[in-house]
Amino acid sequence: MPTPLKTGEVLRSRYKIRRTIGHGGMGSIYLADDLRLEGRQCALKEVEHDRTLPPETIRQARDQFLREATVLARLDHPNLPKVSDYFAVGGRDYLVMDFVPGKDLRMLMLEERQKGAYLNEALVLGWGSQIMDALEYLHSQDPPILHRDIKPGNIKVTPSGLVKLVDFGLVKILAPDEMTITILQGRGTALYTPLEQYGSDAGHTDARSDIYAFGATLYHMLTNSPPAEARERFLNPTCLTPPRQINPAISPQVEKAVLWAMNLHPDERPQDMGVLRKALLGNWSSPVTQVRKPANPGLRDVFRSPGEQTLIWITLGLAIFSLIVTLVR
């Protein structure tokens, strides 16, 4: 890992480092003061390319960084941090973004877990709706932009309640020839990464890869339990526990939509965010996903059975009739 910058260092005579707020395999993320705009804080994403690579490969990687930074700087959406600048210092490249205050969803989820509670479904869906807005916007660009690292830790809720998808570290732009260009080498976080994303950069990832990661993120937030990794599920298809077995308060519609998004094969997922939105929030019936069922139904599940309910009413009626006969005698 590159040596982090020190507090007080100034880059490009403009950005004064306050502290490190995150780490990655190819650099750090810093909180910095913008010396040209008093009171403005920003986040600096640092990228240092592998110096063991051939010089030509490093040059191509840096050219890719600059091309993609140019694209990201043109994005304008309320649920995405604004990219305001990009530059190079020595062998490192930097992307300058708005600093987003607030807690990330991972922190909020852990707080609920410590209380022995779950995040409220309506609250999670409200956050999810905003993230879907951001992803629809990214996927609708020409060419489409994939995030590739959607997870609770990359989603922040500001003090005003606005949700931001904050990390562009693995962002990928789909070029017209369907080849791909990547700012940072990487495969995302294993818990939320679909199988197709484990291939090379020329792999067949598209919007459905983000849909998988978003579904896995919803699964984690609603259950307080990490989803089984896609690689593990490929070897053992029954290892993903249905969300309602963990948190019965989850509605059946939401469970079906989440599991639909998390199908291992891209063709078996919603084909775009609009379809997934309808499955989660609208009057929409998503395809039934084959998941492991409980070996023994609980008492409440038995009493929900129509046959068992009929038997209960008959038994209750006979008991009341016997009581009346006894009183009359």
Image: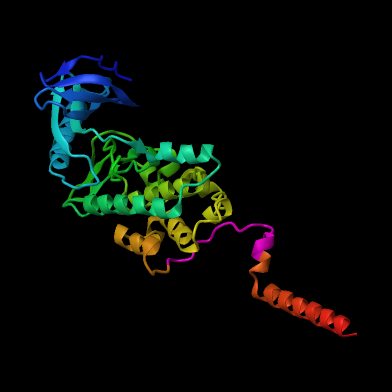
Q: Is residue 127 visible?
A: yes
Q: Is residue 187 visible?
A: no
For the C terminus, give its image quadrant. bottom right
| Whether residue 264 is situated above or below residue 97 in the rendered picture | below
| Whether residue 65 is situated above or below residue 299 in the rendered picture | above
Q: Which residue is located at x 34 percent, y 38 percent? A: 154
The residue furthest front is 328
Is 185 in front, or is 305?
305
Q: Which residue is located at x 25 percent, y 42 percent? A: 172
Dividing the picture into quarters, in which one does residue 40 lie? Answer: top left
Query: What span is in magenta?
Result: 286-301
Is 329 in front, or is 104?
329
Is 306 in front, or is 86?
306
Is 171 in front, or is 223?
223
The residue furthest right is 329
Q: Which residue is located at x 30 percent, y 61 percent? A: 274
Q: Position of residue 319 (x, y in %)?
A: 80, 77
